[in-house]
Image: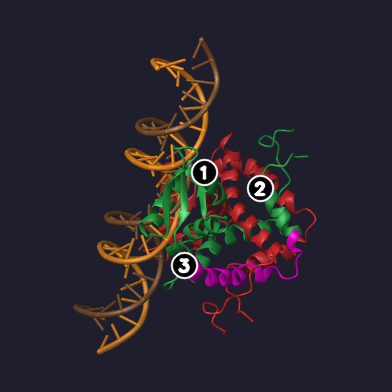
Chain colours: A green, B red, C orange, D brown
Amino acid sequence: MADPSSATPQPLTCEEEALVRALGQVMHVLPRAIDADMVGDRQLPLTEYTALMNLSETPDRRMRMNELAGLCHLSLSGMTRTITRLETQGLVRRERCEEDARGWNAVLTDAGYARLQEAWPSHLAAVRRRFLQHFEGFDLAQLARAFQGAGTAEPTD
Amino acid sequence: MADPSSATPQPLTCEEEALVRALGQVMHVLPRAIDADMVGDRQLPLTEYTALMNLSETPDRRMRMNELAGLCHLSLSGMTRTITRLETQGLVRRERCEEDARGWNAVLTDAGYARLQEAWPSHLAAVRRRFLQHFEGFDLAQLARAFQGAGTAEPTD
DNA sequence: AACCACTGCTTGATTGGTCAAGCAAATATC
DNA sequence: GATATTTGCTTGACCAATCAAGCAGTGGTT
């Protein structure tokens, strides 16, 4: 009876079900809502925003494609395309990596930095309004820890 | 200074930032992980699973496209395509709506019901293992309420 | 120093979603 | 009761992501 596909497992409790449904909704609604809040001239799709953000947090505003992809939760090819998009807007440029000529750095340009500065406040406001605000009573650190664990398959017992 | 796009807003606290990042990760990782867990026996993409699930919970196993789209958090055209996919697999069929001839019902077939029965246990196990398990200490009902509010723009003050 | 497996990134094909336009049935208006 | 508007769903064009295949540069082995 250890095989979950042959046993009939315990169904979800009412609260569990509500939580699962609510999460499903949030996962659909939240990114769009945040995107939508930034429409206007400061519009910047969430993926591109995240890329710029991560670049800006680096000491010399540059990062290898690989690493950036990881931080943006994107496949490497997804990252390639995102950076290409940003490059055509002049917000990022590619530079060969000095210590390894197969590698490339995505480098945040001044224009990119300025763009980010512009987008940042409305992004932040959206995150607060659409998300953080609703968790005011909670222990955020504990919650964050729970989320960090989620998605990973912790040993089942 | 009430305009959030002109003021420099308060940056996130450390815990807030951790929470936001963790949520970002979960939103990317969780659906894939749950999908992947079902690959083993009975693969059924999450979207299609959700559609079947919602149909099965209805008294006569049928629902209008519109309503189903809402429950699946999908646009109407997205729903059209999902149902088309399911229809070619014989898991759902379309029936004209009796009381309104422009409307269609998506109807869960017996094959579809059987398929869902098959997929259900491993889906459930995945949800527990990948998600619920990590929130054991929490007040689930309270958490669910917070999530239900998230994504919606509550009046800011 | 010539080969070979490996690594870092890009490119091509496909997928699964969106929005906007289209079509058919229903309803409102004159 | 004919015409105009609205509604419910589908279709076409597009977009952003994925995976798999390709290519260029690296580095170990002989």
Report in which chain the residue with disc 3 lies.
A
Query: Badge 2 local density, few (<14 within 10 Å), some, or many (20+)?
Result: many
Q: Residue at x 65, y 42 (%)?
A: B121
Q: CA distance from mark 1 to mark 3?
A: 24 Å
Q: Main secondary structure of the magenta part?
A: helix
Quadrant of the snapshot with the C terminus of chain B: bottom right
| Residue at mark 2 | B127
Pointer 1 and pointer 3 on the same chain: yes
Residue A37 located left or right of residue C28: right
Q: Which residue is mark 3?
A: A114
Residue shown at the point (73%, 50%) measured from the top left: B134
Q: Is residue B94 visible?
A: no
- Numbered disc 1: secondary structure: helix
Distance in Å between CA atoms under marks 1 and 2: 30 Å
Label 3, residues with CA under 10 Å away: few <14, some 14-19, many ≥20: few
Q: Amino acid at mark 2?
A: Val
| CA distance separating discs 3 and 2 | 42 Å
Which residue lies at the image location 74% right of the left edge and 60% below the top edge?
A141
Front one among B23 and B79: B23
**Residue A51, disc:** none
Amino acid type, mark 1: Asn
Q: Nearer the viewer, residue A142 or B9?
A: B9
Q: In x, y percent, where is residue D2?
A: 19, 78
Determine which residue is flagged by label 1.
A66
Which element is circle 2 on? helix
Neighbours of disc 1 within 10 Å: few (<14), some (14-19), many (20+): some
Chain part drawn in magenta: A116-141
